[in-house]
Image (cartoon, helix red, strand yellow):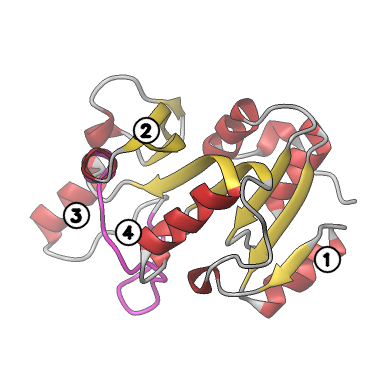
Amino acid sequence: MTKTSIDTISPDYRTILEIVGPASSVLDLGCGTGELLSLLVQEKNVKAQGIEIDDKAIFECVAKGLSVFHDDIETGLPEYGDKSFNYVILNQSLQQVKRPDKVLQEAFRVGSRVIVGIPNFAYISARFQIFFKGKVPVTPSLPFEWHNTPNLHFLSLLDFIDYCEKQKIVIEDSYFMNGQGKVRLFPNLFAQTGIFVLSGYMR
């Protein structure tokens, strides 16, 4: 398997690496070209599986020695039983699906914990670009222009926290970061991305 240098990984990958326990089972929904899964296998010896819809990305995953299946995560996960995985990861993919409610429901069904990573559309640089330029913002965590963005939902960190509260989803832990590392003060303003560890619905 191709190795990834831990010294060059992004802050969100580093945070997820800290969260996931050694030798655990992981399902990455929307795993892209498999950089995160490869890192988790390399550093945490996880039992890794991924689901991805892009054929070219899947070829890159296979070249890395990863087990990745071609599927649309919005159609559900019928091939997996309840609590099949210790962790289900949705990193930078939840805002790209049409029905996040359904995707999260299935993620909670097959995983004991769900790790969600989202870009922060209320990041200070994005606010300045909208206010002063009057244009859709482009930032390191939102690198696309309006005509080629895969994002369907535009939310801030506070939006996601409010969503979890309304849906009675338990947030076990949360981490906020920008290009320099973790952000502890006013994250909805100064963090580019957020990582949330969720443990399902409150009863």
Asked whether the viewer can see residue 33, the reply is no
* Residue at 71%, 48% in the rendered image: 37
State yes or no: discs 3 and 4 in contact (Cβ < 8 Å): yes
Residue that badge 1 annotates = 62
Say what secondary structure mark 3 lies in.
helix
Is residue 111 depicted above or below 61 in this figure? Answer: above
Q: Amino acid at mark 2?
A: Val
Q: CA distance from mark 1 to mark 2?
A: 34 Å
Q: CA distance from mark 3 to mark 2?
A: 33 Å
From the image, give the main secondary structure of the stretch colored magenta: loop
Q: In the picture, which quadrant includes the C terminus?
A: top left
Q: CA distance from mark 1 to mark 3?
A: 39 Å
Q: Nearer the viewer, residue 177 or 42?
A: 42
Q: Amino acid at mark 1?
A: Val
Residue 91: x, y in percent?
Answer: 51, 50
Is residue 60 depicted above or below 8 in this figure? Answer: below
Say what secondary structure mark 1 lies in.
helix
Mark nearer the N terminus (1 vs 4): 1
Q: Is residue 126 left or right of residue 91?
A: left
Q: Which image quarter: residue 184?
A: top left
Q: Which mark is residue 138?
A: 4
Residue 158 is covered by the magenta coloring: yes
Residue that badge 2 annotates = 170
State yes or no: discs 2 and 4 in contact (Cβ < 8 Å): no
* Residue at 74%, 55% in the rendered image: 49
Q: Which residues are magenta?
A: 142-161
Q: CA distance from mark 2 to mark 4?
A: 31 Å
Mark nearer the N terminus (1 vs 2): 1
State yes or no: discs 1 and 4 in contact (Cβ < 8 Å): no
